Image (cartoon, rainbow, N blue to C red):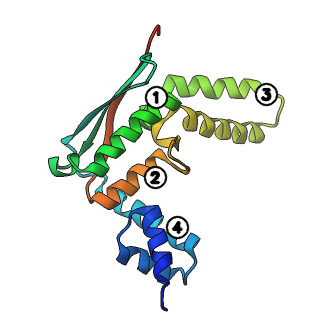
Amino acid sequence: MKVDVELVKHIREKTSSSVIECKKALEEAKGDVDKALEILKKRGLLISQKKVNRETKEGLVGAYIHTNGKIGVLIEVNTESDFVARNEEFKELVKSLTLQITAFDPKWIDRESVPADILDKEREIYREQFKDKPPAVIEKIVEGKMEDFYKTNVLLDQKFIKDENITVNEYICSTIAKLGENIRVRRFIKYELGE
């Protein structure tokens, strides 16, 4: 199948994937741009999953002070090599994450970081709110509410500030696929004047 050069260019602009990868995805999707984008997204997730156990000792500490001077964020993002840590795309990722934290105020990096007592307390609150429903229904509601809790309070589960069609985790995974190294958010802190 002959692939339209303009479609390849369009997908490359949207994903920053290589021309060859964009062309392959379009061929596989038989010219359907949405399917090609989905194929590239899945490939990026597969690549990032293969790299997840690699050690990350290099990286950057990023900082952001909001223009009013009342909010500040510090973040440490690690990668495998100093070479990638100096890459402009990696620096952009760190900057984007500081903006994400400033705007959406996550409390934890990932689901595993949320203390068990907080999760238990949240579940109990939801069970109490819907105690008049049948038990099976209550549990489905509680799980749905917990997903909302994660999307609000966990950095990796939040919608990405620059593209609401993806999560922060998907953004990081796509950067891992592009740069070829594991990337991990190690820690962050947000300061607000008066808190």
**Distance (Cα) linking label 1 and label 4:** 29 Å
Amino acid tagged 4: Glu
**Distance (Cα) linking label 3 and label 2:** 36 Å
Residue pointed to by mark 2: 170
Task: Identify the residue shown where x is 33% and y is 40%.
Answer: 94
Instruction: Give the number of the mark in front: 3 or 2.
Output: 2
Amino acid tagged 1: Thr
Instruction: Give the number of the mark in front: 1 or 4.
Output: 1
Of callouts 3 and 2, the N-terminal one:
3
**Distance (Cα) linking label 2 and label 4:** 12 Å
> Is residue 182 or residue 116 the one in the foreground?
182
Residue pointed to by mark 1: 102
Q: Is residue 47 above or below residue 142?
A: below
Residue pointed to by mark 3: 131
Q: Position of residue 151 (x, y in %)?
A: 56, 38
Q: Position of residue 42 (x, y in %)?
A: 46, 65
Task: Identify the residue shown where x is 35% and y is 45%.
Answer: 93
Q: Position of residue 25 (x, y in %)?
A: 46, 77
Q: Position of residue 192 (x, y in %)?
A: 45, 16
Element assignment for label 2: helix
Task: Spot the residue most to the bottom.
Answer: 1
The residue carrying pointer 4 sits among few (fewer than 14), some (14 to 19) or many (20 or more) residues within 10 Å by Cα, namely few
Of callouts 2 and 1, the N-terminal one:
1
Instruction: Give the number of the mark in front: 3 or 4.
Output: 4
Task: Identify the residue shown where x is 50% and y is 83%.
Answer: 4
Of callouts 3 and 1, the N-terminal one:
1
Amino acid tagged 3: Lys
**Distance (Cα) linking label 2 and label 1:** 19 Å
Mark 3 touching mark 2, by CB under 8 A? no
Q: Is residue 146 above or below residue 8?
A: above
